[in-house]
Image (tube, rainbow, N blue to C red):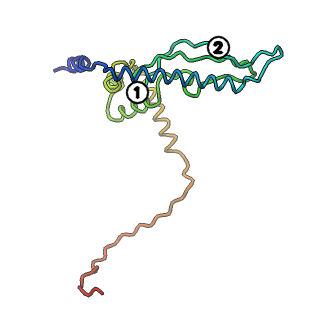
Amino acid sequence: MTRAKATASLSSMQTESPLEEVLRAAACQMLKAALEAEVESYISKYSQERDEDNRRLVVRNGLAQQRTIQTTVGTLHVRQPRVNDRRDGHQYDSFILPKFSRRTTSIDAMVASLYLNGVSTNRMSEVLKSMVGDNFGSMSPAVVSGIIERWQELYRDWSKRHIEKQYVYVWVDGIYTNVRTTNDRP
């Protein structure tokens, strides 16, 4: 059986279960609720700040365009709440869902692990779909290469770090053959 036929038969066997649909819907609702709570907290924190016309400087400003986030439960479609922060030098940035974020860090970790285990950059999207599910979007080899380069850079930084603690160790090597060779125990 060729690789293409095996992949086709494997993908035809993989159908999304109702459980996965429920998990993805719940994850989407939870993300939406968390983003709403984060925005409300930010706005209420600065609700007392006003301009010279007594208008609030930090207000909600609708929803951003829909974007897709690749997660371990599949691809989620999210419309993030926007905030108009008119204070000088300030801008609202979500801690939960940063700007330009398109996938979770666990997906990046999966990509790095798969790469270290021999999965090529060209087959990465196919393997991730088999692991995460058919709802997982595609991932180009260029994106995979970028993830691997970032992991390699982190490794280089880690390997060049300065170790501040000094560890003392003693290595003792020897054989003592006269241990309990007699029966004269007290």
Q: Residues within 10 Å of mark 2 (few under 14, many from 20)?
A: few
Q: Is residue 182 left or right of residue 150?
A: left
Front residue of 141/32: it is 32
Which of the 4 image quarters holds residue 21? top left
Residue topped by disc 1: 72
- The spot of residue 158 in percent (x, y) is 50, 43
Give residue 8's mark: none
- The spot of residue 49 in percent (x, y) is 77, 23
**From the image, which quarter does the N terminus lie in?**
top left
- The spot of residue 164 in percent (x, y) is 57, 53
How far apart in space, not on screen, are marks 2 and 1 (Cα)? 30 Å
- The spot of residue 128 in percent (x, y) is 35, 25
Q: Please report contact status of discs 2 and 1: CB closer than 8 Å, yes or no.
A: no
Residue topped by disc 2: 61
- Please tell me whether mark 2 or mark 1 is closer to you in this view: 2
Q: Secondary structure at mark 2?
A: strand
Who's the residue at 56% across and 23% down the image?
35
Who's the residue at 48% across and 21% down the image?
29
Q: Is residue 88 left or right of residue 26?
A: right
Front residue of 53/67: it is 53
Which of the 4 image quarters holds residue 43? top right
The residue type indicated by label 2 comes to: Asn
Q: Earlier in the sequence, mark 2 or mark 1?
A: 2
Who's the residue at 31% across and 24% down the image?
130
The residue type indicated by label 1 comes to: Thr
